[in-house]
Image (tube, rainbow, N blue to C red):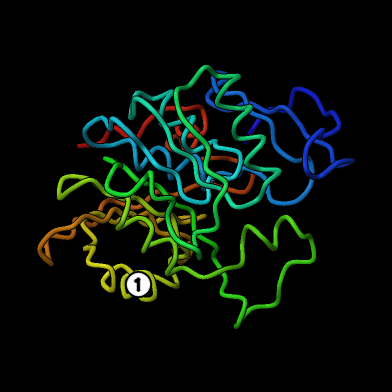
Amino acid sequence: MASRTRSEPLPHPTEGRRITWDAVARGAVRFAQPEHGYRVNVDSLVLAAFAARGRRAALAVDLGAGVGVVGLLLHHGGACQSLALVERDPALAVLARENLAASNVPGSVYEADLEQGLPRALEQRADLVVGNPPFFDPRGHRPPSDPGRRAARQGALVPFVRAAARALSGDKARAAFVYPARALTELFQAVAGVGLVPKRLRLVHSFADRPARIALVEFRRARPGGLVVEPPLVEWEAPGRRTPELTALTAGATDDRR
C-alpha cells in the first residue's frame, strides 16, 4: 500500500522506537510513521478520496490525525488550502509536524485529547472535517496487545463526532468519517446527538460477495433526509489482485464520480 524508503530511530517522545519513511500517491506524498504499531493503511486512502469530493476547503481539520497522512492526501489532491491536525499521542504529533514541514504544507498540529474537547482555536473554523475514530469501545472489546494499535483502535466515538460538530464552520461545511459498516447504527445515533445529518454514504467491501467492511459517511448540519447511497467500492477482484478503482485510489487518484 505504501512504499518504504528507509528506517531510522525515532528521536522523539518514544525514544528507541524506530520510524520508517513511506510514500503513497505514486511517491508524491511522503511521510514518517512508527515502524511498529498502528500504521497507515488503505482506510486512510479511501477516506481521503471520499472526503475530497465537494468544494475546496479553506481549512480541513483531521481528528485523530496520527502522522497526518489523510490531511496530506487532501492537500495533495487540491481539496484544501491548509490543515489542522489534532492528535493526542505526543510521538505521533511530532511526526505529523515533521510531515507537514517536509511536504511544505501550510497547517498546524494540535496535541489534544478529544475527550477533553476540541481545541478552542478550531471551533467553527473548518469547511471540511475528516475522522477515522477508534473502531472499538474498550468496554466491549479485548484490547490489541501492541500499545500503539491499542491507542489508535480503542476509544469512544462520541468525542469525535462532538468535536466534528464544533469544528464545522456552517451549514455548507461537511464532515467525513470512516467507520465499521457493522456499527453504522451507533455512528448515526452519535451524530444525531450533536445535530449532524448523514448526507452521503458509501460502503466498502473486501470482495463483491462479502458483507461491507467499512462505511464512508459524510455529515452536515441540515434537515434530516436526502441521504445519497453511492455505488459500493470493492477492494479485491481476487486474492492478491486489486480492483481497478482501488488501484487508482491507492495511487493517489481522487474519487471524482458525480
Residue 46 in which image quadrant: top left
**Observer able to see residue 237:** no
Residue 218: x percent and y percent? 29, 53
Residue 47: x percent and y percent? 43, 45
Residue 151 in which image quadrant: bottom right
User: How many callouts does the rendering have?
Assistant: 1
Residue 49: x percent and y percent? 39, 37
Figure check: 92 above or below 162? above
Residue 216 in which image quadrant: bottom left
Q: Which of 217 and 111 lies nearest the eye of the viewer?
A: 111
Q: Give the labeled residue for mark 1.
A: 190
Q: Which of 123 and 181 lies nearest the eye of the viewer?
A: 123
Figure check: 147 above or below 128? below
**Observer able to see residue 7:** yes
Residue 258: x percent and y percent? 19, 37
Residue type (three-letter) at the residue carrying disc 1: Ala
Figure check: 130 above or below 229? above
Left or right: 57 in relation to 76: left
Left or right: 39 in relation to 207: right
Q: Residue placed at 75% from the left, 51% from the top?
A: 37
Left or right: 255 in relation to 199: right
Q: Quadrant of the N terminus?
A: top right
Q: Residue placed at 26% from the left, 40% from the top?
A: 127
Disc 1: CA contacts within 10 A as few (<14), some (14-19) or many (>=20) = some
Residue at the far front: name it: 120
Q: Which of 93 and 5 lies nearest the eye of the viewer?
A: 93
Q: Secondary structure at mark 1?
A: helix
Q: Residue placed at 49% from the left, 59% from the top?
A: 114
Residue at the far bottom: name it: 140
